[in-house]
Amino acid sequence: MLIPFPENPAENILPFDGDAYYYRQVFSQEVGDAIFDQLLHTIDWKQDEILMFGKKIITKRKVGWYGDLPFVYTYSHSAKKALPWNDVLKNIKSIAEKHTGKSFNSCLLNLYHDGQEGMSWHSDDEDTLEPDASIVSISFGAARKFSFQHKTNKTSQSILLENGSLLVMESNVQKNWLHALPKSKRISSPRINLTFRTMKMSSLEK
């Protein structure tokens, strides 16, 4: 079910077992477009490498990994070392922290070239992440459907993430829910997504 935009931006869009708050336009259309262009040309984009069914797969989707310190983030059997923040990311991080009242030490960026690229069901619950810490997702570019599925009873919920929007996932969301970015042949334009996170200090490169 695709839920309508919440009239109250502080409304929890999940029915139970977790809190997810959607803010439709933290950045205006004009500002969002400008930030998208800056990110496209300043981020050190790399194709992602994941291990699936014992085979290494290189994705068309590109990623960037940044942080306060050289945190090592491992998911899908692929390890990445965080690069230092650039000025664009520092500004976005500051806005995310002021808007949510949370603090973050790292950010994973994804560049989806069109609707043919997406993300399968998963939870952001790796051991290197602080447990139950908030994750803030900020989107620029093409609006994309974002879906949740409860791990136990399979209840599903979806929302459209627009250019300049912000989604906060906190409390038990990662414990109880999977999330995904479904593919869509109807979308021909790109999207950049930033997820601000809190890494454990133990994840620093030894």
Image: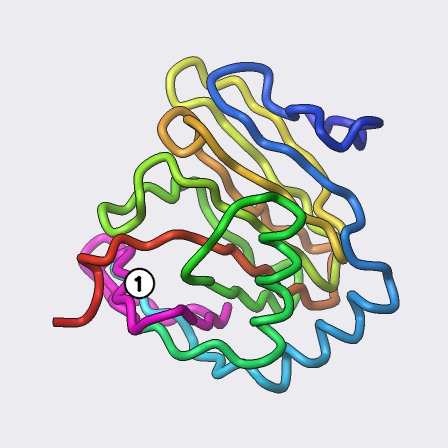
Coordinates of residue 159 in the picture (x, y in percent): 69, 36
Which image quarter holds the N terminus?
Answer: top right
Give the residue at mark 1: 50
Main secondary structure along the magenta-highlighted residues: strand
Coordinates of residue 129 in the picture (x, y in percent): 31, 48
* Left or right: where 169 falls relative to 200: right
* Left or right: where 27 falls relative to 82: right
Task: Report the label total.
Answer: 1
Q: Is residue 129 magenta?
A: no
- Image coloring type: rainbow
- Type of residue at label 1? Ile
Q: Residue at x 21, y 60 (%)?
A: 203
Coordinates of residue 95 in the picture (x, y in percent): 66, 58
Q: Which residues are magenta?
A: 52-80
Which image quarter holds the C terminus?
Answer: bottom left
199 versus 32 height, above or below: above
